[in-house]
Image (spheres, helix red, strand yellow):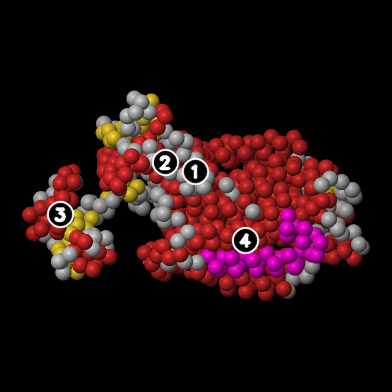
Amino acid sequence: MANVASVGGAKAAPMTGEEKKVIFASSLGTVFEWYDFYLYGSLATYIGATYFTQYPEATRNIFTLLAFAAGFLVRPFGALVFGRLGDLVGRKYTFLVTILIMGLSTFLVGILPGAATIGIAAPIILIALRLLQGLALGGEYGGAATYVAEHAPNGRRGYFTSWIQTTATLGLFLSLIVIVAVQSLMGSTAFAAWGWRIPFLVSVVLLGISVWIRLRMNESPVFQRMKEEGKGSKAPLTEAFGTWKNAKIAIIALLGATMGQAVVWYGGQFYALFFLQNVLKVDLQAANIMVAIALALATPFFVVFGGLSDKIGRKPIIMAGLLIAAVTYNPLFKAMTWTANPALAEAQASVRATVTADPADCKFQFNPTGTAKFTSSCDVATAFLTKNSVPYDVVPGPAGQPATVKIGDETVTSFDAAAAGDKAKGMTAAFEKGVNIALHDAGYPLKRAAAKVPDSKLDAFIAANPELALNADAVRAGEKETMPADKLVAGKLLTAEETNGVTDMAVYTIANGGTFAMVADPARVNWIGTIAVLFVLVLYVTMVYGPIAALLVELFPTRIRYTGMSLPYHIGNGWFGGLLPATAFAMSAAAGDIYYGLWYPIVFAAITFVIGLIFLPETKNRDIHTMD
């Protein structure tokens, strides 16, 4: 690469107050843009229930995460579009375009009706808005990192660009704080119904602030000087990726740095949050608070490791983070299970379910579109166990026979949902109840809600639930609520046909007679232990992410820097990182092991470590001001 000067031990001049102000403004605007982008991930549970209501829970989780991933998949295309624009017309104006697209797309999610109102149009529009967000973010990061680096003095570039590296985590932190605050003010019921939209609507205020900040920014002095000297690239895409000299650098940057950095970043923050909420069944608000505390504690280390990279180099810190994460991810997530839901960990350690099934009946349930239906008796059994975070083994059974689930000494027979026809709903309820009772008896942390039973169905309810040992006369002699017919129908206690000739009816509340749910007992959640594990996971993030902006900027010359660094960064983070939650969840579901999905980040972190160790150059002594 031409004119790469070494600044070695030369003492860099300190930045001026104006340069610090400009860089602060750039970073603050980027925080708001990340806030917009990550609201979706933080509210994935509510979004899934609003826009993907037609699918069962396990499929809805995968579909919701893939809609989240859609924003990541288009990030490389945003990097190409806006990277080219940034190298042609400047960093400042590209900033304005990306923040406007991001902010408006986020606001529209807040007012988008759900599937119950506008049907299939709701998830289609939602995904379209996520794609727009991804395009905007694809142009944002490369511009911010390039802009800050081109203001920074030699010898301190790692330190100054590390502030940009805090923006993604601070954006996630800000989104969690807003969500927790709104939840606390509204209560969980109202928040689940409509209050989750408020953080999206608030983003319009942040959009106004961000646009005002961007309008006050000056163009990068390095870019301005290059334009004045007539050294700008007329075809940044062709120059960056059409010649082997520069394309080789982009490939090394991807496979030897950003690919592994991405899976550690998303594994340590987003998948950790998803794991807490959906696998360990920790209360959503409690999980958000724990992750927010871990982020607050670990975020300063972005700057610590960024500054350290100015002294010992970018490469040693990034490689160390990749290696340590690959080696310790499995024990750390297992430790999180013991601290966040010890009852679940204890049950998993002593009891595994055994699914006995015809091998031809069992399908690999990787469902990337969320639309496939798995209806065989084996698939019905394994999908339900996965939803409840129960480890299981599948053993061959007689051909043509329905699968059975054995938990402890209890065996429950599954069924073929397609063959069941209109009886499927009742058979599903009976199968799930049988498995849940077996899990509860085996020590799994299931709670059974109260059931509201109208008088006309009381005798049938008692007959269907002999384990409750109820007496009809005793129940009828106890407390009851008289409910009018319209409320019986609205509450789905009776159908309209069942209320013919009825003006009102007594309704009994049966304790522990309703649906089962796997939960993490709040009294047994070890907050300090869980936050400690989360802190370590985020610390790994700071190691791989803190120095990487400086590394990427220093790999490419000024004329194609925005374009050159953006594409490998967003392929790594948009594809390898963005697909991690959905892929890891599906892998765990397929293997019957909640930790199996961790092989995704472990393998890619290890591959990046090997490639980076061999091929990635050290860049800390390069002078980007003289790179053409």
CA distance for labels 1 and 2: 10 Å
From the image, tell me which residue sits under label 1: 367
**What secondary structure is found at the residue carrying circle 2?**
loop
> Callout 3: 10 Å neighbours few (<14), some, many (20+)?
some
**What secondary structure is found at the residue carrying circle 1?**
loop
Where residue 499 sits, quadrant-wise, is bottom left
Residue that appears at 80% across and 65% down: 89
> Callout 2: 10 Å neighbours few (<14), some, many (20+)?
many
Q: Amino acid at mark 2?
A: Phe
Counting from the top left corner in percent of width and height, residue 335 is at 46, 41
**Contact, CB < 8 Å: mark 4 with mark 1?**
no
Counting from the top left corner in percent of width and height, residue 256 is at 71, 40
Q: Amino acid at mark 4?
A: Leu
The reply, left or right, for residue 365 in relation to residue 217 is: left
Q: Amino acid at mark 3?
A: Leu
Q: Earlier in the sequence, mark 1 or mark 2?
A: 1
**What secondary structure is found at the residue carrying circle 4?**
helix
Number of numbered discs on residues: 4
Residue 551, relative to residue 215: is it above or below?
above
Magenta-colored span: 80-109
From the image, tell me which residue sits under label 3: 458
Residue that appears at 69% across and 50% down: 569
The reply, left or right, for residue 448 in relation to residue 157 is: left
Residue that appears at 74% across and 71% down: 217
Q: Residue furthest right?
A: 229
Where residue 104 sits, quadrant-wise, is bottom right
From the image, tell me which residue sits under label 2: 374
Q: Nearer the viewer, mark 4 or mark 2?
A: 2
